[in-house]
Image: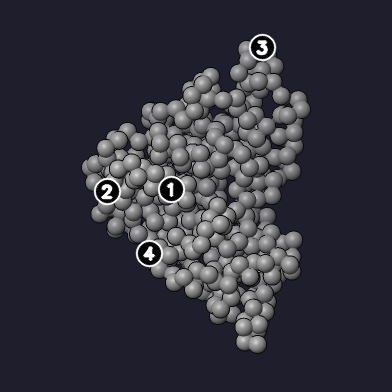
């Protein structure tokens, strides 16, 4: 199989498997015990935390390990807002874990304001600044769209928001931007940042929340006081080790120029065959959303799978829902959305595999059209 649904999840690196297995077999001790074997495991966790922090431009004490980015996002919305009576601003392009968290607060009477997207899928910056005021408690803007791969200018937005409303806390869902954009979190100037390890070659079930140093946040899980008392529960030592190993391996493989060149080549091929690329400006290079006219994405997906290619048709977490909230916000019609396929690359995706897959995807679409004509 040629696997091109890496925005949904990724194959686990061998190095991450080895790191997790070592932790399970040899370093199985509870890291919160006081005897030497347990202390050694605790030191291993801190070494992993320090390594990841250095790679993303943060201090190690700013990272708290969670089970996934969905948990991290929920934590911010449930515990990370100081002004409980203030309004909250999010973009229309947010992942469902941010959007639904905001909707939960709205159901309790919170003033939720949604900034629209432009035609390319990025946030409409002008509208953000119109929506934010001195009572805005939290602004949440996704770093890289999980639907289109468009990168939002988080640093510029944060700088402008600090001028408009210095007390506003700024959060970014960084699931598709983590490691891939090369941004330093300190340079972005935000307060919270969420990430999930299974998007970069680590197992499912481990993520993190960046909490800017000095920023108080209420604990999300109470108990024995692990993770500086913010997220109690015995740490997932094997997956934390795998997380650090995956960061190291991904960092070695990552080549931004190669990914952008490959993405451009794929996009050019689709466009030359009458397709439309959604989110074609300022893209991360890893995600391509393509509208293939008169070919329903679900059928294309199934036919391509039968021919040895796996692609997505939007966010995996929304697979059971009809329509697509984010693509609708860009201005696509229901008919166009039905024909949108999401191709997502990985740091080690080979050019030949990707281009062969693209041809199979288009062949699948042509089969659908032929059947309709017949």
- Compared with 145, 236 (above or below) is above
Q: CA distance from mark 1 to mark 4?
A: 21 Å
Considering depth in this image, is 333 or 201 the residue closer to the camera?
Answer: 333
Tag 4: Cα neighbours inside 10 Å, few (<14), some, or many (≥20)?
some
Residue placed under numbered mark 2 in the picture: 132
Q: Nearer the viewer, mark 2 or mark 1?
A: 1
Q: CA distance from mark 2 to mark 4?
A: 18 Å
Is disc 1 in contact with disc 4, using a CB cutoff of under 8 Å? no
Q: Percent from the top left, x then y, of residue 169? A: 34, 39
Q: CA distance from mark 2 to mark 3?
A: 51 Å
Q: Percent from the top left, x then y, of residue 341? A: 57, 67
Residue placed under numbered mark 1 in the picture: 100
Q: Earlier in the sequence, mark 4 or mark 3?
A: 3
What is the secondary structure assignment of the residue under circle 3?
loop
What is the secondary structure assignment of the residue under circle 1?
helix
Q: Residue at x 56, y 78 (%)?
A: 294
Task: Using residue 24 as the reference point, say whether residue 320 is left or right of it.
Answer: left
**Quadrant holding the C terminus:** bottom right
What is the secondary structure assignment of the residue under circle 2?
loop
Q: CA distance from mark 1 to mark 3?
A: 43 Å
Tag 3: Cα neighbours inside 10 Å, few (<14), some, or many (≥20)?
few
Q: Residue at x 51, y 62 (%)?
A: 322
Q: Earlier in the sequence, mark 1 or mark 3?
A: 3
Which image quarter: residue 37? top right
Q: Earlier in the sequence, mark 2 or mark 4?
A: 4
Q: Earlier in the sequence, mark 1 or mark 4?
A: 1
Q: Earlier in the sequence, mark 2 or mark 3?
A: 3
Q: Percent from the top left, x then y, of residue 283? A: 49, 60
**Quadrant holding the N terminus:** bottom right
């Amino acid at each position: 199989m040629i696997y091109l649904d890496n925005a949904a999840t990724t194959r686990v690196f061998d190095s991450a498997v080895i790191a997790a297995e070592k932790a399970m077999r040899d370093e199985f001790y509870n890291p919160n015990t006081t005897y030497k074997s347990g202390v050694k495991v605790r030191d291993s966790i801190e070494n992993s935390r320090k390594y990841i922090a250095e790679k993303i431009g943060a201090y190690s004490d700013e990272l708290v390990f969670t089970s996934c980015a969905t948990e991290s996002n929920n934590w911010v919305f449930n515990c990370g807002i100081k002004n409980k009576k203030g309004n909250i601003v999010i973009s229309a392009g947010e992942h469902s874990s941010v959007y639904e968290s905001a909707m939960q607060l709205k159901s309790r009477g919170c003033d939720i304001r949604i900034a629209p997207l432009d035609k390319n899928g990025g946030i409409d910056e002008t509208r953000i600044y119109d929506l934010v005021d001195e009572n805005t408690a939290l602004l949440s803007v996704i770093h890289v769209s999980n639907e289109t791969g468009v990168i939002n200018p988080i640093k510029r937005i944060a700088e402008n928001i600090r001028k408009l409303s210095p007390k506003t806390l700024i959060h970014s869902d960084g699931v598709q931007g983590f490691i891939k954009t090369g941004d330093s979190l300190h340079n972005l100037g935000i307060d919270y940042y969420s990430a999930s390890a299974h998007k970069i070659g680590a197992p499912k079930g481990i993520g993190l929340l960046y909490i800017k140093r000095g920023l108080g946040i209420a604990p999300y899980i109470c108990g024995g006081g692990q993770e500086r008392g913010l997220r109690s529960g015995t740490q997932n030592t094997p997956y934390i080790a795998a997380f650090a190993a995956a960061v190291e391996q991904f960092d070695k493989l990552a080549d931004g120029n190669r990914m952008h060149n490959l993405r451009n080549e794929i996009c050019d091929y689709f466009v030359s065959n009458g397709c439309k690329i959604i989110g074609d400006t300022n893209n991360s290079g890893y995600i391509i959303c393509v509208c293939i006219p008169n070919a329903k994405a679900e059928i294309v997906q199934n036919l391509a799978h039968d021919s040895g290619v796996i692609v997505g048709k939007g966010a995996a977490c929304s697979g059971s829902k009809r329509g697509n909230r984010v693509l609708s916000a860009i201005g696509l019609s229901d008919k166009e959305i039905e024909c949108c396929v999401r191709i997502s690359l990985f740091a080690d995706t080979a050019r030949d595999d990707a281009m062969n897959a693209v041809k199979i995807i288009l062949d699948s679409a042509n089969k659908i059209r032929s059947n309709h004509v017949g």
